[in-house]
């Protein structure tokens, strides 16, 4: 009965470093989403996977952001050459992928770029 | 473009008071979904409700109730007899209907503090 698991819980990176954030969705969940939540703001959509296919990446803010889900389960969000404006909480969510299934969110990874 | 406005940035009440959180949305879609999520200090977004744009019937779940009014593009959330455990940030969100892509558009959230 585990929920969506994200690691690490906190990440501090120096500007210019690459980071990789991991998401373990609920077993059997077809759909997976990444959202970015800046301090004091609502989450903003980054990208969406259905199984291993990345069907929507319209929210990725720049080509420094890259997401993958090679086997249709675990997903990784990678940020290259981090900038201070990348500091935010990165939320992962999954769902069964059917029309009536709600999103289940993880606790997020808080990224701080110094 | 879709937009969700939560005009109340912060609300503070005393336990047992009723409190209403406002949500106004904008969309050009004729069919859509509306949501409320709760975000406690732990950071996880907890799903509270999803409402289909065709269904304007108000809903009650325990101490929670929702008032959806399409004419005013509002989807307000009321907590009756508030409790300290209700303290959290509450987000209203909007998505297009259809398919499995829940590309949610969130409001900025309302921080609710319930004092003992």
Image: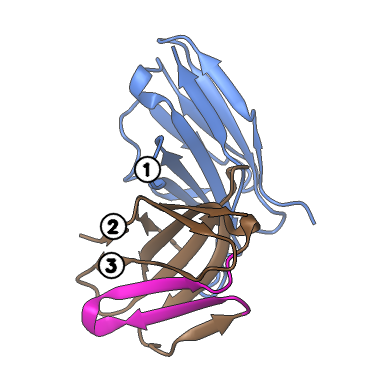
Q: Residues within 10 Å of mark 3 (few under 14, many from 20)?
A: many
Q: Can see residue A50?
A: no
Which element is circle 3 on? strand
Mark 3 highlights which residue?
B24
Q: Residues within 10 Å of mark 2 (few under 14, many from 20)?
A: some
Residue B5 vertical position relative to residue B60 in the rendered view, above or below: above
User: Do discs 2 and 1 belong to a common subunit?
Assistant: no
> Which callout, 2 or 1, points to the residue nearer the camera?
2
User: Do discs 2 and 3 belong to a common subunit?
Assistant: yes
Q: Can see residue B9?
A: yes
x, y percent for residue A19: 52, 20
Mark 1 highlights which residue?
A41
Q: Which residues are magenta?
A: B62-82
Sequence-wise, the earlier of marks 2 and 3 is 2
**Which subunit holds the residue at mark 3?**
B
Chain that appears brown: B
């Amino acid at each position: 009965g585990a929920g969506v698991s994200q690691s690490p819980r906190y990440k501090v990176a120096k500007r210019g470093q690459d980071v990789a954030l991991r998401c373990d969705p609920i077993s059997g969940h077809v759909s997976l989403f990444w959202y970015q939540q800046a301090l004091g703001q609502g989450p903003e959509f980054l990208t969406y996977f259905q199984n291993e296919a990345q069907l929507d990446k319209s929210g990725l803010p720049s080509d420094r952001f890259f997401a993958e889900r090679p086997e249709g389960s675990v997903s990784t969000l990678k940020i290259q050459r981090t900038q201070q404006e990348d500091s935010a909480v990165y939320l992962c969510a999954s769902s069964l992928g059917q029309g009536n299934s709600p999103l289940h969110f993880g606790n997020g990874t808080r990224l701080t770029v110094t | 473009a879709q937009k969700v406005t939560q005009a109340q940035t912060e609300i503070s009440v005393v336990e047992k008071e009723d409190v209403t959180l406002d949500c106004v949305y904008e969309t050009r879609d004729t069919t859509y979904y509306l949501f409320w999520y709760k975000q406690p200090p732990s950071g996880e977004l907890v799903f509270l409700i999803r409402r289909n744009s065709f269904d304007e019937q108000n809903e009650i779940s325990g101490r929670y109730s929702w008032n959806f009014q399409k004419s005013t593009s509002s989807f307000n959330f009321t907590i009756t007899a508030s409790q300290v455990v209700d303290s959290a940030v509450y987000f209203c969100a909007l998505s297009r209907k259809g398919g499995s892509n829940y590309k949610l558009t969130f409001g900025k959230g309302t921080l609710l503090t319930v004092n003992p």
